[in-house]
Amino acid sequence: MALHRRATAEGVGTLLLVLAASAGGIAAQKSYGVEPGLVRLTLALVLAGALVSLIVAFGHVSGGHFNPLITALQWLARERSGTCALAYVLAQLGGGLAGGAIGAWLWHATSKPVAGLRWEGFASETVASAGLMLVVFGCMRGSRTETGPFAVGAWLLAAILATPTTSYANPAVVLGALVSAGPVSLGLSSALPFILAQMLGALGAFALVAVIFPKAPRRT
């Protein structure tokens, strides 16, 4: 596969991994405060879920390193060319910086109601939906149908714990939440921003899918 596709997969995968770690840490701190055991447990679940899902989704493209140390050792072992290793490392470092910044931003992104709608969760749902679509399409385009449900479930575990909106990432779930009760219920003022955010995240993911994954055969 072309180097730009593989490097992009490493960059995006590292971004999502670090984003989950950054946002998950903030979420755990907000939920448990000074309870280090619970914070560590939450971070372990977030990182394990994110890493498993991302390796399954992106591994068939780039190897699923998401770590410059792995790439560097492969280069030292002469298993990867210098050009490829450099592209991977630059993508991983850039993805890590972006992921950390976005993870922190998600928990600080606030907005005032506009036209009666609440937009506080817009950023969270955009990122959560984009991540979910990347994992889903990564599994589908890699013909990993057996492990796809496992990868999607692992990603949702990480996203639910790490994102401020607990990752609805599905317009059908939002509509169900309108008539539901309990912690998953939503009001009309939040539903439309959530759905718009999910559509935006899905379209952003679709653009990345076109770069990272070869086009799947057309279904008849």
Image (cartoon, grey):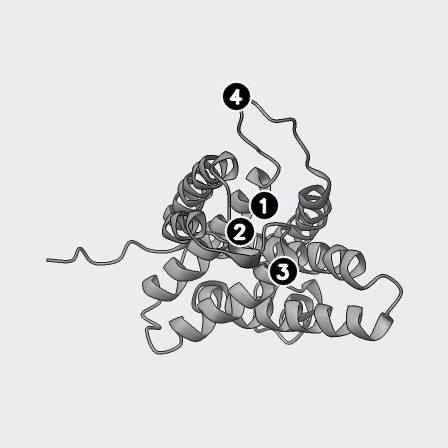
> Residue drawn 48% across and 54% down?
3
Circle 1 crowding by C-alpha within 10 Å: few under 14, some 14–19, many from 20: many
User: Of label 4 and label 1, which has the lower sequence position?
Assistant: 4
Residue under pointer 4: 115
Nearer-N-terminus badge (3/2): 3
- Please tell me whether mark 2 sits on a helix, a strand or a loop: helix
What is the CA distance from the residue labelled 4 to the residue labelled 1? 20 Å
**At which x and y percent is residue 145?**
32, 73
Q: Position of residue 54 (x, y in %)?
A: 52, 65
Query: Mark 3 or mark 1, which has the lower sequence index?
Result: 3
Cα distance, mark 1 to mark 2? 6 Å
Looking at the rendered image, the disc whose residue lies closer to the viewer, 4 or 3, is 4
In which quadrant is the C terminus drawn? bottom left
Task: Say which quadrant the N terminus sits in.
Answer: bottom left
Residue 53 percent across, percent down from the top left: 51, 68
Q: Nearer the viewer, residue 157 or 3?
A: 157
Sequence order check: which comes first, mark 2 or mark 4? 4
The image shows residue 195 at horizontal and vertical percentages of: 43, 40
Q: Amino acid at mark 2?
A: Ala
Which of discs 4 and 1 lies nearer the camera? The answer is: 4
- Label 4: how many Cα within 10 Å (few below 14, some 14–19, many 20+): few
The residue at the point 52 percent across, 43 percent down is 126
Report the residue that reaches farthest toward the top: 115
- Residue displayed at 63% across by 60% down: 17
Tag 3: residue type?
Leu
The residue beneath circle 2 is: 128
The reply, left or right, for residue 26 in relation to residue 56 is right
Residue at 61% across, 51% down: 91
Measured Cα–Cα span from mark 3 to mark 1: 15 Å
Q: Are marks 2 and 4 in contact (CB under 8 Å)?
A: no
In front: mark 2 or mark 4?
Answer: 4
